[in-house]
Image: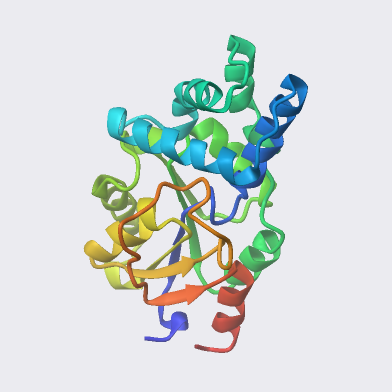
Amino acid sequence: MPLTDRKVLTFDVVGTLIDFEAGILDYVQAKAKAAGVKLTDQTILEAYAAAEDRQHHEAPRLPFPSMMAPMYREMADVLGLPGTEDDVENFRLSIPNWPAFPDSIAALNRLRKHFYLVAMTNSDNWALSHFAKTLDLPFDDLVTAEMVGWNKPDPQVFAFVRGRLSKEGYGFGDILHVAQSQYHDIAVALRLGYHTCWIERRKGKPGAGATPKVESVAIPDYHFGSLVELADAVNAGK
């Protein structure tokens, strides 16, 4: 089915549109430098992924900003960094400084000419308000884990979004789910019968970065290394 036969793009935000790994590294490397601790980027990202995976199992209903305090405490312990209450809280408060990927804003502006765009994120309302501004407010609808009461990969998040879309007159076959994370998005969306588009932001890089690892890679309907490649494919009528 051509991309242009869809009417709705539902987007994972953090990791797909927002470069959360850059945001995490900016904060943690600054703390490491101040403490005289030398850490590789890969070590930091793997510590974040392990802490996030643990929190998803222990508190699957919390938006990820609410997970960041225990995550930072675990990371600080593993990485040998200071973990004062200010350090912990400022990790969450660094969210407004997390950058968009270089292609996100321009590609979203192109895609919004063809599709109804929905943000579908594990963040809370506060964090998404900042991400949406960073992305130049491209979305027609915003859905957060705070609104749903659950985090992806729980299927209830997808059901919540489908309910909102049905009120706008869109059916299941109109939706293409676009995401970077195999762990949070692609595998569960495929199990639920969605058409999916994997934006492999870590293409060519070692490991899974700050995203928890999966046992096997789910094969999406579409696979691109960047959002601009998706926009180009849409414009080409693919």
Q: Residue at x 76, y 22 (%)?
A: 34
Q: Residue at x 52, y 55 (%)?
A: 140
Locate residue 64: give its quadrant: top left
Please tell me which residue lies in front, 147 or 34.
Answer: 34
From the top left corner, tell me how far across and down residue 54 is, in percent. 35, 33
Q: Residue at x 30, y 56 (%)?
A: 162
Residue 133 visible within the image: no
Please tell me which residue lies in front, 230 or 186.
Answer: 186
From the top left corner, tell me how far across and down residue 6 is, in percent. 41, 76
Residue 4 visible within the image: yes
Please tell me which residue lies in front, 153 or 204.
Answer: 204
From the top left corner, tell me how far across and down residue 134 is, in percent. 68, 46
19 horizontally vs 159: left or right: right
Q: Where 17 falls versus 198 (above or below)? A: above
Q: Where 207 falls versus 2 (above or below)? A: above
Q: Residue at x 55, y 23 (%)?
A: 76
Locate residue 175: give its quadrant: bottom left
| Coloring basis for residues | rainbow
From the top left corner, tell me how far across and down residue 69 is, in percent. 50, 21
Question: Which image quarter is the N terminus in?
Answer: bottom left
- For the view shown, which residue lies furthest in the top direction? 85
Please tell me which residue lies in front, 3 or 24.
Answer: 24
Q: Where 71 falls versus 12 (above or below)? A: above
Locate residue 61: give its quadrant: top left
